[in-house]
Image (cartoon, grey):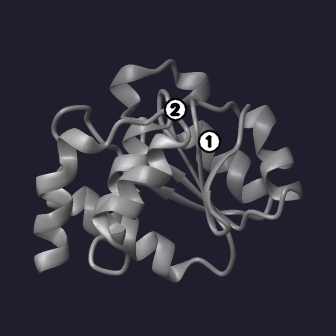
Amino acid sequence: MEIRSLTPDYAVSPQITPDDVTAIRAAGFTTLIDNRPDAEIPAEVGTEAMRRAAEAAGLVFVANPVVGGAISDENVRAQCAAIAAAKGPVFAYCASGNRSSIVWAMSQAGARPTDELIGTAAAWGYNLEPFRARIDGFAAG
């Protein structure tokens, strides 16, 4: 598991396993967001297995499945709500961390400049440039 901190309070990662959850909690995270649809993964890392592991470790668990190439406004609203409700740092994961970065950037649009959001993700190798217009659209309201 590689923790890729986009901000002091929000990090992303490629797919994790239930065995990683204790280390995530020990690193200070309080909320775990699963951005991976169950149709993409085996049951041992599916939503319910991850929910059980997260809750057993004392983490708040949020399932917000994001389909690659089809990020919905509801996905963005759900990510924003989970981040806003968190009582501490948030850890989000998907296949590579890219979708978790995209929905984060869209959820933060207007609160931070688009260039900053795109640049922050780019520092970890995530190219959000193709989403610039959509991020700007969320910023506009």
Where does residue 136 sit, x and y in percent of width and height? 16, 65
Determine if residue 58 is in view.
Answer: yes
Q: Which residue is drawn at 43% across and 48% down?
A: 101
Amino acid type at circle 2 is Gly
Q: Is residue 81 above or below residue 131?
A: below
Q: Do the residues labelled 2 and 1 touch (CB within 8 Å)?
A: yes
Q: Is residue 129 above or below residue 42?
A: below
Where does residue 35 sit, x and y in percent of width and height? 42, 44
Q: Name the residue under label 1.
A: 50
Q: Where on the picture, by quarter, is residue 73?
A: bottom left
Q: What crowding class fits label 2: few (fewer than 14 Cα within 10 Å), some (14-19), or many (20 or more)?
A: some
Q: Mark 2 points at which residue?
A: 46
Amino acid type at circle 1 is Met
In front: 11, or 31? 11
Q: Is residue 111 left or right of residue 68?
A: right
In the rendered image, the residue lying farthest to the top is 42
Q: In which quarter of the image is the C terminus?
A: bottom left
Label 2 to label 1: alpha-carbon separation: 6 Å
Q: Is mark 2 on a helix, strand or loop?
A: loop
Q: In this view, does 131 lie to the left or right of 26?
A: left
Q: What element carries label 1?
A: helix
In front: 9, or 33? 9
Where does residue 69 sit, x and y in percent of width and height? 18, 33
Q: Is residue 105 left or right of residue 130?
A: right
